[in-house]
Image (cartoon, helix red, strand yellow):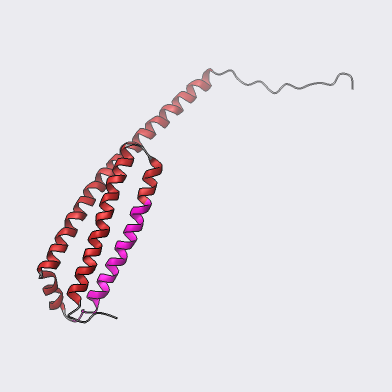
């Protein structure tokens, strides 16, 4: 049931506050992700990524609920503009913008760190292949398996 006009601002504020809470938790997880990468703790990194995915799902659900609340007011575009001009909602939107900017910065750093790790692993694999080829070229050739011949039988 869509809220009536008087409930919309408070409902929007509630949903934005919940979204800020979830994104704040995601920001903390992004920091943990950065630490796990620095420590090369890949198991912990996997756990943190799973938690972030769960929060992403929850934020998406909040966005849908927010769209539903605002969708009930589609016929009145002026109400939407006035709603987003109110101080409490503008303040919440500014907080959201700051958190999203921080998340974006951390995500960019994480991606560059992962790219560096990938390049390092690729270089190690290349060196292992070169070493293997070198070792195999000097290794004695395998002779066919020895066979026993039954001379008495």
Up-down: is 106 above or below 68? above
Up-down: is 83 above or below 145? below
Residue at image point 24% right, 55% down: 24
Kindly indicate the quadrant of the structure image that contains residue 81.
bottom left
State the image coordinates of residue 20 (x, y, percent, origin top left): 22, 60
Residue at image point 50% right, 21% down: 135
Residue 114 can be seen, yes or no = no
Pick whichever, 149 or 31, lies toward us.
31
Pick whichever, 27 or 105, lies toward us.
27
Q: Which residues are magenta?
A: 50-75
Residue 68 lies in the magenta-colored region: yes
State the image coordinates of residue 125 (x, y, percent, origin top left): 42, 31
Pick whichever, 15 or 123, lies toward us.
15
State the image coordinates of residue 70 (x, y, percent, origin top left): 22, 75
Q: Is residue 131 left or right of residue 31?
A: right
Q: Is residue 68 left or right of residue 54?
A: left
Pick whichever, 130 or 60, lies toward us.
60
Kindly indicate the quadrant of the structure image that contains residue 86.
bottom left
Residue at image point 36% right, 53% down: 51
Name of the residue lying farthest toward the right = 153
Majority secondary structure of the magenta segment? helix
Residue 60 lies in the magenta-colored region: yes
Q: Is residue 6 left or right of residue 28?
A: left
């Amino acid at each position: 049931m869509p809220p009536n006009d008087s409930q919309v601002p408070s409902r929007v504020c509630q949903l934005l506050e919940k979204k800020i809470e979830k994104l704040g938790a995601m920001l903390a997880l992004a920091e943990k992700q950065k630490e796990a990468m620095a420590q090369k703790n890949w198991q912990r990194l996997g756990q943190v990524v799973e938690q972030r995915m769960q929060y992403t799902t929850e934020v998406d659900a909040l966005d849908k609920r927010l769209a539903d609340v605002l969708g009930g007011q589609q016929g009145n575009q002026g109400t939407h503009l006035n709603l987003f001009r109110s101080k409490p909602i503008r303040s919440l939107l500014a907080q959201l913008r700051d958190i999203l900017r921080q998340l974006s910065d951390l995500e960019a750093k994480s991606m560059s760190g992962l790219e560096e790790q990938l390049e390092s692993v690729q270089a190690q694999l290349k060196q292992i292949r070169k070493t293997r080829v070198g070792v195999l070229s000097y290794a004695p050739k395998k002779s066919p398996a020895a066979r026993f011949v039954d001379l008495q039988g």
